Image (cartoon, rainbow, N blue to C red):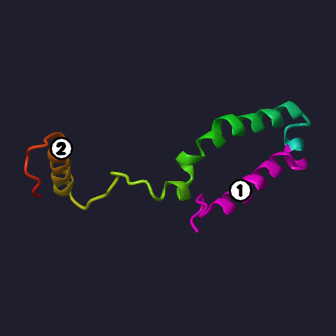
Amino acid sequence: MRPGYVEDQNEYEISKFILLQFICSAPVIAAAEGKIFMIVAIMKFLRFHVFVYEGLFLHFKRMDVPTFFVSHSSQHEVSMMVVYLCLHFYSCDAPLTY
């Protein structure tokens, strides 16, 4: 397992539960100097600005999505790939030879 990556839905739910329990724990309340509104603000931030974008940052949900971020060892390969993709996607009657 890589740090920062969860491998399935169960592991993510457990990590999320542990995070929410930690935010509501005594050490975090002590760090906030007993100001509960700060804890509530953190919880609202997570709920409305982090958890709504789970599909973007969870690796196990993105594993089946194809991407074009492919690394190459030389610039020539990259430029040829760009030419190939441009011919393939923007010219319907061009022969697709690579």
Q: Which residues are magenta?
A: 1-28
Left or right: 59 as drawn, with respect to 65: right
Q: What is the chief secondary structure element of the magenta stretch?
A: helix
Location of mark 2 (residue): 86
What residue occupies the far front of the structure in this picture? 93
Q: Earlier in the sequence, mark 1 or mark 2?
A: 1
In this rendering, the answer to whether 32 lies above or below 62 is above
The residue tagged 1 is 13
* Residue 80 is inside the magenta segment: no
Q: Amino acid at mark 1?
A: Glu
Query: Residue 6's image quarter?
Result: bottom right
Q: Nearer the viewer, residue 54 or 78?
A: 54
Q: Circle 1 sits in a helix, a strand or a loop, which is it? A: helix
Residue type pointed to by label 2: Cys
Under tag 2, what secondary structure?
A: helix
Quadrant where the N terminus sits is: bottom right
Q: Position of residue 13 (x, y in %)?
A: 71, 56
